[in-house]
Image (cartoon, rainbow, N blue to C red):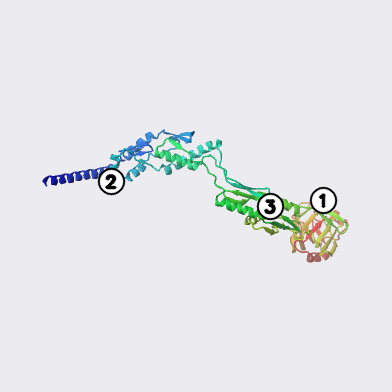
């Protein structure tokens, strides 16, 4: 019994001693602020070192360390730590690592030969430098590498044909930066970049691709019709298809191509820049060049409108956005209500619904470069009572002529108005006594002219 009692006491004493050692060593690591035995950072053994000692050792070891970037058996390039401007020697960061050690687990570092591998999380501190290096490496390497291709579809022979995605071997700079950082933190001298390829962003199995393809097919099955001044224009399916783009997983339209199409449509059917064939009252059929009167498609506004309608995929039956004057859905142009000014005969007629409502001699501009009345198909764009017309005479003096009725027709200040200062009208009086360009009208006739025209009425001067 005495023997067993002594054994128990001995075991207890030994246990207490071991416990004391365990606690003491834990307190040692806690107070000494050193790394556990065989701890490695970036491949450098810093076991038993303080933060200051570890910082000095890491600085020396990583001063000019070389890393080889491998893609399978191929060496992409080699880099050195000085190219990355690493900051893994920060004492503050090393102290934080020591502080994260579990001091009560120190026995594991006595009984095993395996070293701890601690990552300093250098990626945050060195991100900008590593990213810059990775971008440079990828840019250079990718010049001789094959780019990945997204899945796409194209319109051929009346149907949409799918082209599958293709893998490439160009390097992704962001992935490469993470791989380089990880290798440096773990102390690996070989950097495996085989998993850092750029991948196709769109595949035939992706939801975005399937949705876009189905929508493209729906668009080209619909009818897109423009009603334009008595004409019906159907946009062909292959034209629609040529406007459809599929980039970054999204279906869109080529605004430039749509703009070109609308511009051509406007030139073909619009009247703003067209010379008219006009049946005059006294001189038969004459040709009159374009003036302000006329219309065109407002391409700037219609381009996004058409794009939106196409992407809706429900077809179209509409008139495009029109700008200018004289647009008629039935295709007529000047129509039956207009003002005719015959400069040769010095006469003006006002037609309303095909009938002459005013007929009068007039005085047009002096037949000189500076003061002639401009030929063209113009438009009454404003009406004003009791206006004062201002300008300059040939000698440089200014004039101010009050009129009771004023109807401007072009963009240079020419218009139709009464002229109490003219003693006569018609004939050849205008040759020496013509106006500064306006159509001088007898006071006895101007009220009737004013009453029978409205803003937007075409004025044919020839």
> Label 1 crowding class (10 Å Cα cut-off): few <14, some 14-19, many 20+?
few
Is residue 398 visible in the rendered image? The answer is no
| Residue 56, horizontal then vertical, whole percent | 35, 36
Instruction: Tally the numbered discs.
Output: 3
Real-space Cα separation, disc 2 to disc 3, in angstroms: 76 Å
Q: Which mark is residue 104?
A: 2
Mark 3 lies on a secondary structure that is helix
Q: Nearer the viewer, mark 2 or mark 3?
A: 3
Residue in view at x 45 percent, y 39 percent = 180
Q: State the residue lying farthest toward the left.
A: 2
**Splitting the image into 4 quarters, where does residue 387 fall?**
bottom right
> In the image, 424: left or right of 136?
right
Real-space Cα separation, disc 2 to disc 1, in angstroms: 109 Å
Residue in view at x 61 percent, y 54 percent = 215
3 or 1: tag closer to the N-terminus: 3
Q: Which residue is mark 3?
A: 237
Determine contact: label 2, label 1, CB under 8 Å: no
* Above-or-below relation of 168 to 446: above
Mark 2 lies on a secondary structure that is helix
Residue in view at x 53 percent, y 36 percent = 141
Q: Which mark is residue 368?
A: 1
Q: Nearer the viewer, mark 3 or mark 1?
A: 3
| Residue 179, horizontal then vertical, whole percent | 45, 40
The residue lying toward the viewer, choosing from 420 and 130, is: 130
- Quarter containing the C terminus: bottom right
Determine contact: label 2, label 3, CB under 8 Å: no
The residue lying toward the viewer, choosing from 328 and 458, is: 328
> Label 2 crowding class (10 Å Cα cut-off): few <14, some 14-19, many 20+?
some
């Amino acid at each position: 019994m005495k023997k067993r009692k002594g054994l128990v006491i001995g075991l207890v004493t030994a246990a207490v001693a071991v416990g004391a050692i365990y606690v003491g060593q834990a307190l040692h690591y806690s107070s000494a602020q050193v790394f556990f035995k065989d701890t490695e950072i970036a491949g450098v053994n810093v076991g038993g070192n303080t933060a200051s000692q570890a910082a000095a050792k890491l600085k020396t070891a990583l001063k000019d360390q070389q890393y080889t970037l491998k893609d399978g058996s191929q060496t992409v390039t080699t880099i050195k730590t000085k190219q990355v401007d690493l900051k893994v020697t920060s004492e503050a960061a090393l102290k934080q690592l020591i502080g994260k050690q579990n001091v009560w687990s120190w026995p594991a570092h006595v009984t095993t030969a395996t070293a701890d591998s601690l990552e300093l999380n250098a990626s945050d501190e060195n991100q900008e430098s590593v990213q810059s290096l990775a971008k440079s490496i990828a840019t250079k390497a990718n010049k001789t590498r094959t780019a990945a291709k997204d899945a796409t579809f194209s319109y051929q022979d009346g149907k949409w044909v799918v082209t599958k995605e293709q893998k490439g071997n160009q390097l992704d700079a962001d992935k490469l930066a993470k791989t380089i950082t990880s290798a440096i933190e773990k102390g690996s001298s070989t950097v495996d970049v085989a998993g850092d390829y750029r991948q196709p962003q769109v595949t035939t199995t992706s939801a975005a691709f399937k949705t876009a393809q189905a929508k493209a097919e729906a668009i080209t099955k619909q009818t897109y019709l423009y009603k334009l001044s008595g004409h019906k224009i159907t946009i062909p399916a292959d034209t629609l298809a040529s406007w459809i783009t599929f980039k970054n997983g999204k279906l869109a339209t080529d605004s430039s191509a749509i703009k070109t199409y609308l511009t051509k449509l406007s030139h073909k059917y619009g009247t703003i820049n067209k010379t008219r064939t006009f049946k005059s009252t006294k001189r038969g059929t004459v040709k009159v060049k374009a003036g302000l009167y006329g219309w065109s498609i407002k391409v700037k506004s219609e381009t996004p409108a058409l794009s939106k309608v196409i992407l809706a995929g429900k077809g179209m039956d509409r008139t495009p956005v029109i700008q200018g004057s004289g647009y008629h859905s039935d295709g007529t142009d000047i129509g039956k209500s207009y003002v005719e000014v015959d400069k040769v005969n010095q006469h003006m007629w006002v037609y309303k619904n095909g009938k002459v409502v005013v007929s009068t001699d007039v005085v047009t501009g002096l037949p000189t470069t500076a003061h002639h009345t401009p030929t063209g198909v113009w438009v009454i764009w404003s009406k004003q009572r009791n206006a004062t017309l201002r300008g300059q005479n040939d000698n440089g003096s200014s004039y101010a002529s009050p009129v009771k009725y004023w109807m401007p027709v072009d963009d240079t200040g020419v218009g139709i108005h009464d002229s109490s200062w003219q003693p006569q009208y018609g004939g050849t009086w205008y040759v020496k006594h013509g106006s500064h360009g306006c159509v001088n009208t007898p006071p006895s006739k101007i009220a009737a002219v004013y009453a029978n025209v409205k803003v937007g009425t075409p004025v044919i001067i020839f």
